[in-house]
Each structure stands twice: as structure tokens, then as C-alpha cells.
Amino acid sequence: MEYAHEKEEFQRLTEATGIERKVRRGLAWYPLALGRSYHNSLDQLVVEVTREGGLRNEENDELYEEESPSLFEPGKPVCFFTEDASGVLHGTGGMLHYFKFVAQVSFVEENRMVIVMPTAEALELLRGSSRLGVQLYLDEQTYRLMFEALDDVIQAKSGRLAELREICHSTLPCGKFTFDAVRFPWLNTSQQAAVNEVLWAKDVAVVHGPPGTGKTTTLVEAIYETLRRENQVLVCAQSNMAVDWIAEKLVDRGVSVLRIGNPTRVTDKMLGFTYERRFESHPLYTELWAVRKAIRDIYASKSGNNESRHQKIARLKDRAVDLEFTINQALFDDAKVIACTLAGSANRLLMGMKFGTLFIDEAAQALEAACWIAIRKAHRVVLAGDHRQLPPTIKSPEAMHGGLDKTLMQYIVENKPQAVSLLTMQYRMCDAIMQFPNREFYDGQLSSAPEVKYRGILDWDVALEWIDSKTEESFTTTQQASSSNQNSKKTRAQSHATAGASSSQQGKEYTGEEAAGLSRANMAEAQLTLATLKHYFERIGTERLIEERVDVGIISPYKGQVYLLRRLMKHDKCWKPLRHLITVNTVDGFQGQERDIIVISLVRSNEQGDIGFLRDLRRMNVAITRARMKLIIIGDRSTICRMPFYKRLSEYADELTY
């Protein structure tokens, strides 16, 4: 159902959505300029493209880096198109004509992208065309891999795959070894217990890591200790970013990592551990490159006897295969950890390989079908994550209601509680912030580390506040009028940002199409959010903020509100000295991050009490657990607190205040 929904959405996007809207939503680059083409280290034909008049990054800071969003990432499929010039000349917008081939993103940064072409003929078609653009294509390959994996799991009659299926989905118990526990004095009690449970597990183990409990630290130690017993392990995650994060921590621990696939925004530290870079740096690569070039030159040349040319090409191809095999064997023999995404575990480089242990990080965000792609290669499985935080991304409501959002980790937590190790000591939040999510999501089992329990920014401060945006409406209206008299440029920006919203909507949520796409926003609440943060900054003092690098996150569940907040801040000069300290993003964008101060704008304000996907409390758990020392929630209590969870949160904030 999810696959059918995505296909339908892609068809609608392709046929009905105008090019300007696609560009604003980050789904397309247009117009496009073709650059140089060449064969990369994997002998793939690639072409460089740049978008003309694209993203300007003159501020070069976190606050604005996503104002013109781009959803292009390495590994994603793309299709090219041209725009009919006749429509453009008449001012009506030209028809889009799509090329009948699919390419793949290899690298992307700001306005430049490197794309892997399927054939040389496809590249020639682009060279001979004008008014080029590129658009994200439906990722059918990942769905194909998930379908294949599910078929293999369903059809398995015997063997290890069938055993793991029954252990995960039936009453078959998990096996355990019985050797003595290993001591890790640098870990806390629950972390030590979790590592030992991983080592004892014969089949399946789960490391449940609530926010700030050191899940990554525990997982790295478990991997390191497992490598004392096994020669090599496979480490996967749903996203490239999550894979890069755990791989970087393993490198810091001194583990030899080979990163398979296309990392997203690879750090300088990790770049040297990618398969491509390690392949290029091997001593035999120079000879391999020369052999491949010789083969291409012979194909391009029309001179000489055909039979002798074929014989020479055959000899060169044999030599190229031998060299590639030798390099690959050396790279994989040297690596202790093979790191890739779940879909990346089906890479041809890993074909036929088996691993004693598979570690899946952020398992609570991965579809079960994706997990089985990698599990087919493993004898035992260790899952790490928190099923009380962000769920997998699912676009079809029908598929979600049908159960697609229930992950493999959730099944194991519910059916095999003896396989689950909960990390209970958290090192992020002060105790006042931690207690509410602890009570609501973790049955009161968490405790705060002594070094963070009572920390704060200001003396006599309240760590968690709820400010009712409805009762503060008159305050923000007055502030807006005052600000408009002082700064006409800011007023124009606010006017532009609220295009499509009538004056009667200013204190309510409204739906508007911004660069982030169709989403909800609330102008009065956005202004209150910034006014509240500005007031808190005044209490702290600008000098102290900069000197101590007090970092701030402004979170909203809605992209429309995020975009609105960014625009308002961009056109208010008072934020300029502090831009490098502030990040504005959605809940999903803050997953895995933390800040000293977090301000949450909930947006929803209506007579019906409709709060939409704010009902997904896992997403709210992520939002409220990003703060180290100060959490400010801004929302219309009369709308949002009709749901019992938010009423309890509001009452808890009042208890702290009074």
C-alpha cells in the first residue's frame, strides 16, 4: 500500500505540479547546466551538474542552511527533463518532457551535484538538449529489495533465517550464553548490563536507549567487545546519516571501518573510510585505472584488425577483473566493521557474505521489511534505538493504520522482554525537564546523572515553561506594531511570509504554501516565540551567550512554521550576532541532537480542538527531550490541552512555575 501510494504521489507530482513549485519544495533543480563528465573510481560514467541561480549561502550558518530546501541525497534516483521553449516564450510555462532513463546521485553540495549516468548514450541525449532540469525519481529499488527480503523470510523452511523469523514473531525463546559478565568500569551499571546482554545473546538482543542515556556509547562498546570474539561484524542503520554517526564513533574507538554506499554529507574524518576512497588509495588502483582507460580507448578507436582488438580487450578485461578482486579482498580483509544502510547491505560488494553479528542502530525508525534485507546475512541480530521516539516515515495513512509503522524492534520488545536492556541513567536533561517524559514514556525508570540533575542557565529559573499563545496574543500584536514602526524592511518580510493568510487568521493556524511545501503556520505564535526567546536572551545577556556558546534550538512540528520563523529572524537585525548559536528546524530535523535551550512552537489553534499529527506522542517525546537546561513550550492551551497528554504536560509546567 505504501509503494502504491508513493507511485501515485510521484505520478501526481510529475504531471500536475509546476516546475516552480517543485523547485521551491526541493524536489527539482532547474535550470541546470551540464559540466564535465568522467569515469569515477568504480568505473561509472558520471556527469557534474550545477543549478543556475540556485541556493545562496551568504550567511553560511545553521539558521538558514535549509531555507531553500534540497531533498537530493547520494544514492537517490533522479530523472532528467526539458521544458518546452514555446510555452516559456509566451509566458504560459512550458510542458515538461522526461527522458526515459533513470540516473543516481553520487554527490551533492549546495548548487553542485555529481550524477551517475546509466549509459554514454543517455549522456549524449542530455548534451544535445537545452532547458534541462533534474527531479527526484521514485526509489523503486529499495521497495524491490524489501519485497525480495520479505519473500525470502516468508518462504524460508529451515536454516538460520527461518529460526530468526520464528524467534522474532512467535513464542520460540531467545537463547543465551552463560559465561561470566565482563566488567566495564568506564560505563554505568545499566550500560554494563546492556553490553553483557549483547555478548550473551545467541539470537536477538535489544538495547533500548531513551534520550541522553548514552545509547551510542553502549553500542560502540558492544561492537568493540564483540570483535574480540568475531573477526568481522555488519553495522547498519536506516539512514546514511545514522550510519555515518555510528561509524565515526567506531573510528574514534580505534576500529577499522569500511563504509559501503554513498554517505550523506560525509565528514572529513569519515571520507577516508568510504569504500570509494579506500579503493582509490590502494597501490594497485593506478594500474587498474590505466587498464580501464586502455579498454575505453580501444573501444573508441576504429583502427586495427577486429579480431586482434577483441583479443586485446579480452586480455585487458581479465587483468582488470583480477586487479579489482585483489583490491576488494584486501579492503574487506582489513576491515573489522562493514558499515552501510539496511538497503545498502544488498550492495553487490557484499554479495554472498555472511556475518556472525548484525548491529542495527536507530532500529525503531526502520521498517521491518528493511531490517530483513540485512538480517538475511547474519547469524544473530542486535537492535538499538528507542521505540518511544520517532517512528519510521510512512506516507500512506492506510498503510500506517494497517500496521506498517510497527517495527521489528517493537515486536521484540513486546514479545521478548527478556531480550531487552533498558539504559536508565541519562546525561542530557536537568531533572525538572527529564521527569515528565520519564513518567509518561519510561514508567519512571530513568534517573538523572548527578552532574546534570540540578544544572541551569539562570539562578531561580524555571526549567520548563508553557506559554499560552492565545492569552499572549495582545502582547505580540503590540510588539509587532512597535517593531513595524522601527523596521519597515522587517514588516515587508513578515507581510510576504504571511501571504495568503487574512488578518483574521493572524492569531490562528493557517495553511500556506512556502518553500517547505504545503504546511501549517501561525503568525502570532511565531512572533510570540521570537519575542519570548528575545526576552530570555536579555535576561542572560548577549556577552554571556556568545562567550559561553549557549546553543538554542527552535522546534516546530510543521515545516510551514519553521520556514516562517526563519524568515522573521532573517529580517530582524537583532538576531545577527547570535545566528551561529541558533538552529530552527522540525522535530525530525532535531532527532539525535540536543541544545542548552529549546523553544517549541506547537502552531495548532482552532475552535474544533483539532491537533492533527501532534497526536503522535513519540514525535513530541523527541521535541521535549532535546533540551539540556531550559525548555519553553508555546501553544494554544484551549486547543492542544483537550488531549490528556498535553493537559498533563501543561499542568506539570504550572507546578514547576508556582
Image: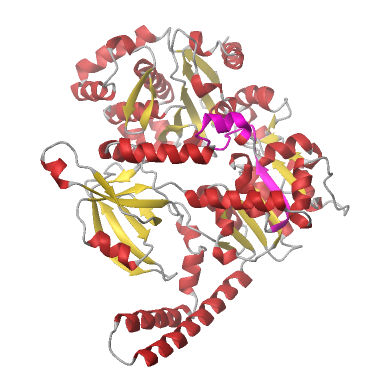
At which x and y percent is residue 367? 60, 42
Residue 379 magenta-highlighted: yes
What's the residue at 26%, 59% (across, down)? Answer: 126
Q: Note whether 241 is above or below 290 in the view shown.
A: above
Q: Horizontal placement of 37 versus 430: left or right?
A: left
At which x and y percent is residue 112? 31, 54
What's the residue at 25%, 17% (across, down)? Answer: 483
Instruction: State the residue in front, 264 or 393.
Output: 393
Residue 256 magenta-highlighted: no
Residue stretch in magenta: 378-403
Quadrant in the picture for residue 456? top right
Instruction: State the residue in front, 541 or 132.
Output: 132
Q: Horizontal placement of 193 versus 543: left or right?
A: right
Give the colour scheme shown.
secondary structure
What's the residue at 83%, 40% (across, down)? Answer: 171
At which x and y percent is residue 237? 59, 49
Give the quadrant of the N terminus: top right
